[in-house]
Image (spheres, grey):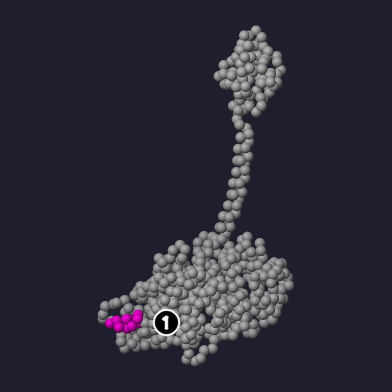
Amino acid sequence: MSMQGGGRLPSTASARTADLDTSRLSQLSNASSINLGGLDYPIGARIGSSGLFVIGDPHTKDNESVRTTDSRLSQLSSHSTLVDGGCPVINKGYDFEYWSWPSIRYACLVLAFAICVALLGATIGLSVQRSFECQVVVNWWQGSVLYQVSVPTFQDFQKNDIGDLQGINDKVTYFSYLGIGMVSLHGFMPTVNKMWQEPELKSFEAIDDRVGTMIDFDTLVRSLHENHIKVLLDLSPVFTSTEHTWFQKSRQQSRSGLDTGYTNLYIWRAQQDKSLNGSWEFDQVRNEYYLHRGNTERPLLNWDDRGLQNLWPGVLEFWLKRGVDGFIVRDIDDFYVTNRKTMTNILSDWRSFLDSHSDKYNRKILMLESSYLALIKRDRPDLYDTVTAAIDLIEHPLTLSKDKIDPTMWSTTQLRADIDAGLAWGDIVGGPWTCWTVASLSSLGSSTVTAMEMLSLMLPGTSSIIAGQEVGKYYSEIEKPLDSDMTAMLWRTGSVFPYIAGSDLGDLNVKLLASIIQERRSAPALQHDSTEGGKSGDKKDFNYKYLEEVEDDTILIRRWFERQDDYYIGVNFGKKPVKRNWSRFTVMAQVVADSGEVYSGNINFQQLVLKPNQVLIAKVTN
């Protein structure tokens, strides 16, 4: 490696820290290129990717330092050593020229990719958050299906003509097949009366030996829980029998003696008080009159009494310890209580007691009838919010009454009014849900019962089935010999399907309801009762719309949920087949269930024919 001319070799420090004086170099050199390591580099050219530049050739032959520089250059083997060696023809340049640009380009690419991923993640996150915000938190009793069982009228397992606890346990697989989420039990406590009649209970904390034992009860609760089915007790503590321990202790309480807590559990008077609702019966033991309703074996409980208010939580706790998940308390409007405020306080106390036995995942619930809520709203609207804060479900009956003009026709106008009234009970975010039940069953035919039941399962809220309704029958329709205790429904041996009172449609009805309940459990539009979460206390935006009511016999209802499937429910309650064009709502839909066994798969909503009492349920996938 050589060069012409001469010059003084600058110090290493000066070569690294400052550019050479270009004016001075222009006077020292007339060369247009320089040979470094066997390669010719034009003046001003970059040396590879090193960031070093050739800036000139000192052309001074007389300078002795030329030989030194030439000698030094011959010893240099890399571009970096040209600078480190102090070569005057090499300029290190600006600081950024020494950055690792390939690494920088790679880092920028990675950063750009990371930003894109972050933006995509943020978009998905906002979408998920929006979807979550639109959903209502659903607890175990909300949107579920309740199966109401009167124990003596279900299955007779012990073959004594009375339904029993073992018979219910034997049909847990049937409940699972239907998709039931809750089972309520009624009519299993000791009574002095026939089992199917309204009982006068001898105890609130025991099992009538005609239907089983406490071991049978515990086994049933355990079996239901193992199949993810909750257990509710159906109670009506309006009165007891005169054989109840409470009444026996109350009648023996001397008026001049110490109050043992049972003195005023019932309504006692020295003289008959005609201002009170009920009848009076003289008791020779206590030497006073007690108030009763219906017959003398039904003394009314005095819910004004603090002693009774203190005793009742003990009854609830007895059953809670046995695994019960909640209570249905009926006939509260018949309770003997002097004012609504007292009853409201009692309900609040029950709520607090149940909360003390609840946890985050297993709230103990309380259900009341809508008839009591109607009384509160009418007489003491100022107490309404307090009452609803204490309960979780409000049972509301769906009725199908005869048309006023044509008594041979059903009135869907009244049905719509019932639906609107039922939704009004559960229209507050964070408040109780409506629980639908089909009423007026004795006046309905089997196919009409099925139609009503299918409709109730498609309404916002929780739904219930009274044992036997799933096949269009009810236990009161079963013929019983006079003065007999035979009350149990007939069941087909070795099959999950019930056989009740000779119903030929039983299997079809059960399959239909099972398919609807399964759809209800998986579809957000059916499981939720509203689309917007909202804040506690806000009005709900129900995901329900009554689309059409034609000639008071055919109705069409729509259910939906954001970014989920829509559902359409059409029902013909008329006496003749009807043709309907519902294509203005949707053109095509997929059949979920059809009680008329006419449609399946994808159907056109432009030309539909519905038979009497036919229910058609279809969905539109979004």
Residue 136 percent across, percent down from the top left: 54, 62
The vertical placement of 350 against 241, above or below, is above
Q: Residue at x 63, y 20 (%)?
A: 90
Q: Residue at x 40, y 78 (%)?
A: 206
Q: Quadrant of the C terminus?
A: bottom right
Residue 414 visible within the image: no
* Residue farthest bottom in this picture: 482
Direction from residue 151 to residue 69 in the image, left or right: right
Specify start and end residues of the magenta stretch as a single range: 245-254
Residue 179 percent across, percent down from the top left: 56, 71
Q: Quadrant of residue 300?
A: bottom left
Q: Quadrant of the N terminus?
A: top right
Residue 178 sits inside the magenta stretch: no
The vertical placement of 286 against 520, above or below, is below
Q: Residue at x 32, y 78 (%)?
A: 262
Residue 251 sits inside the magenta stretch: yes
Direction from residue 128 to residue 587 in the image, left or right: right
Query: Residue beneath label 1, please?
Result: 208
Crowd band around label 1 with a 10 angstrom C-alpha radius: few (<14), some (14–19), many (20+): some
Q: Quadrant of residue 29?
A: top right
Direction from residue 579 to residue 134 in the image, left or right: left
Secondary structure that dominates the magenta span? helix
Q: Residue at x 42, y 82 (%)?
A: 208
Q: Mark 1: which secondary structure?
A: loop
Residue 242 visible within the image: yes
Q: Nearer the viewer, residue 307 or 108?
A: 108
Amino acid type for the residue under numbered disc 1: Asp
Residue 224 percent across, percent down from the top left: 49, 72
Residue 468 percent across, percent down from the top left: 55, 80
Q: Nearer the viewer, residue 499 or 351?
A: 499
Q: How many marks?
A: 1
* Residue farthest top in this picture: 62
